[in-house]
Image (spheres, coloured by chain):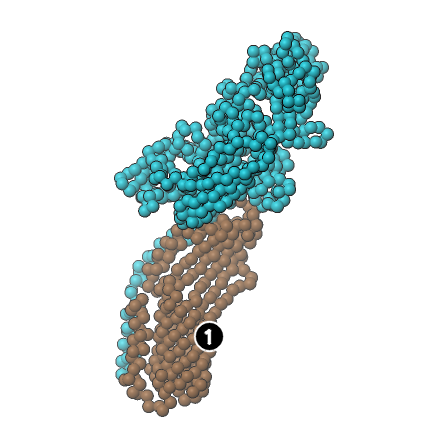
Chain colours: A brown, B cyan
Amino acid sequence: MNKILILPVLMLLLGTPAIQAQDSSPKKIGLAIGGSASTNGLGFSVIAALNRSIAVRVGYESLTQSFAEPFVYGIEDIDFNITPNIKVGGITANVDFYLLKGLYLTGGVVQTNFDLGVNLIPKDPMKIGEIEYQPEDIGELNVKILPERRLSPYAGLGFGRTISRDKKLALNFELGAYHMGSYVIDMTGTGLLQGNSDNASVKRINEVLSDFSWSGIYPVAKLGLSFRIF
Amino acid sequence: MKKLFLVVMTISFVVLTSRCTFTEDIEKLTNLATDSLSLVLGTPVFDTGLQLAIKNAKTNDYIEDAVVTVTVSGKDAAIVYNNLGIKSSAYKTKLGLIHLILDPTKIDSAAMLTTPKEFDLQISAPGYTSVTQRVQFERKRTRILTVNLVKLNDAPEGVVVASAPSFASSSASGSTTSTAVLPLNGGEQQLSLAPGVVLRDASGAAVTGTVTANVVYYDPTANNAASIFPGGLTARVNLGGGTRDELSLEPIGMFNIKFTAGGKSVKTFSNGGLTLKTEIPVGAINPSTNQPYKVNEKVDMWSREEGSGEWTFEKEATVKNVNGKLILEESVTHLSDHMYLRHKTPCTFRIRASFSGKVSEYNRKSNAFSIGEGVDIFYVYKDGKEKLFDRYAFRVNDDGTISSNFITEPITLDANIAKIKIVPSTYHHKKLIFSQTLFDVPTDCSNFGVNITVTEDVAPNPNLDINFNLQVSSGPLTVKPNLEIKYRKTGSGNEYSSAFLTVGSGKMSIALNTDYDVAITLGANQGKAKMKIEADGTDRYKVTFSGLSLVDILSQDEQSSSAPIVIQAQKQPDGSINVSYKVEVDADVLNQLM
């Protein structure tokens, strides 16, 4: 974790006099507001250009998707209504370092809202013994995939500019990833399914997941547009 | 410079984030696939039901030497199931314990207040007398009901059992050939059949051959009359004309009579009947006059309806003086339970029990269930014997403060009850002390309140607290049941204590190095074992379950294991031990739980 955080910090530190010295434009400092569409959802950001090669971005992105019509899935002889819920995005803080006029490296942190959930409810009444129970009497099961840590380092490579050097508008496309430690599965239940809140198999799966070095990496593809205020 | 920087950054990124664990991860993924996600299911929690304890009236212990059969009939019999939610024409037990539940989807708290759920139990066992008992629920709760059966070859005081293999003989037409007399209790009671009385079975066919008489007589003057009288001395009776009432019975004598001949049971008589004679006990008081019985006074004769078990008025008998003794003598034309009695409006009252006090704080994490301390209410009879009336609970706050109360179901007083005893239940989280436990019964039958201050016995608990976890698994499915484990010291003859497992977890308090009987009833499956916990070093314990047996009481399929199950358990920081037991079973066994 610490090693991974070094990268954006290193980039921040490297964006110092030697690089600034290359910049000969009179218009160095600037401020822009922007919007974006990405695998983290729609968002907005405030971008500050410190000089021609370094900009700082703070923004918020969010994508929430729930499904009105649940999927129906049969387990044994029982049909379950399965409703997925997707929530990604979060607050981002990045430093962009321009290698070329239209190519930049970016790094920073994301306070992620990442939350993938599935809700399972029996579709029809169920018989236990000879007594028929309504779905609400049986209970429901909620399975979530959550990040091990909410505050995650982010790194990416971008094309275009997050803040224009000389004009009002700028367009950028960015590919990157943030690393959330590992994925953690969380399962809770109610009614007859409440025992899943302490499901030993979930604990074992989480132990295995925590050992995967690639687990918890979330890829990001982002298209951004900004308007330079000054 | 720019290119160099780019190369350095790329290499740094790769080195810092990659640990080259790909092959290990593949292996772990393989393991994960085989150790995949399992689903945990609980079993339904039934908030309304009946814990039925069937005991030997003489020994006061659970009947385990015969299979007890319980059939359910009456208004709401259709919503009664066993505790797996399965209906049966006859529920059976070899442990003297049956747990019946009411369909939780068919009961409504508000409706029950005005229209109680009601059904009748017919309880029988080979070699024992039978009992019919009506059960009512005015609200959602689990009731405790203890029913005493009389063992015919080992009857308690107050019960006379007589068997006459050649009581009478009947011709091909079913007509008795001579006078038949069967004296009981030194002649204080007597059955007689005149010649020419025709014996018939339930279908009306003649019963012919040598008639065997089996008669049980219940003595109303016995100190234990209330506990030995089948169904007790308070009953809902049929007064005729569609009128029914709950009455307090003051019997003069009760006969249970069975005649058999040629493989048939006699049900009715024609051309006369069976004469039942009994002496009125000296000093017996007529509740109508509140004076001793006198000649020419009337006494009712009642009989019990088969099926419903309801007492029905038949006729009036007249008190006669024969040789200086007051007697009642009447004939009956059908065979059942017959009783001479007077009755009066029952003395019925409720107790409002208020609890206050302070005990130590509760560690809610150690209790999977809500904190309610159990309270047992007993009848205390004049002969000193006790009978559990019911079990309630009062609420204790997390900080240990108590300010709670409950109101009992109606308690019906009979002449043999001397006191009411209110004590901490054998099922409890803490060892509690009540400021008062014995209470006088109200002479005017009015409701009364009791204020009980609760304190805690803080002396070190000599017992070991066991955190019990039970799981039953089949493949990816695990059932963590909600059930009751009953346990008591072997040979103690005590009431069972209960450990209620909620989602597979519960607590019990056990003395070290002591044998315990453990019993579980799950539908038609009844499990029994002995449990013993021994120290194994300073902080380890050995928990041994032996003599395990599991009976499917309906199919009589019995599985037993002579090999004990031994579980090693570590002492926890709070002094308790965790005992976990996971059973792997076939899918069809699991299906029985669900």
Across and down, in percent, residue B69 comes to 54, 29
**Residue sitting nearer the eye, B425 or B347:** B347
User: How many tags in the picture?
Assistant: 1
Say what secondary structure mark 1 lies in: strand
Residue drawn where x is 71% and y is 31% of the image: B242
Q: Which residue is rendered at x = 58% and y = 30% of the image?
A: B443
Q: Position of residue A98 (x, y in %)?
A: 35, 82
Choose between B541 and B146: the one closer to the eye: B146
Q: Quadrant of the N terminus of chain A?
A: bottom left
Please state if B390 lies on the left or on the right of B344 as rendered: left
Q: Is residue B282 left or right of residue B475?
A: right
Q: Residue lying farthest right?
A: B241
Q: Quadrant of residue B528?
A: top left
| Amino acid type at mark 1 | Gly
Is residue B509 placed above or below B345 in the rendered structure?
below
Return the residue at label 1: A43
Please tell me how crowded label 1 is: few (under 14), some (14-19), or many (20+) other residues with Cα within 10 Å. some
Q: Residue at x 67, y 13 (%)?
A: B320
The chain ID associated with circle 1 is A
**Viewer can see residue B500:** no
In the depicted structure, whether residue A126 falls above or below residue A161: above
Q: Which corner quadrant holds the C terminus of chain A? A: bottom left
> Can residue A200 be seen at all in this image of the molecule?
yes
Q: x%, y% of residue A124?
A: 57, 52
Please tell me which residue is depicted at 45% across the width and 38% down the height of the picture: B434
The correct choice, above or below, for A77 with respect to B544 in the image is below
Residue A50 position within the rendered picture, expressed as x and y whole percent measured from the top left: 36, 83
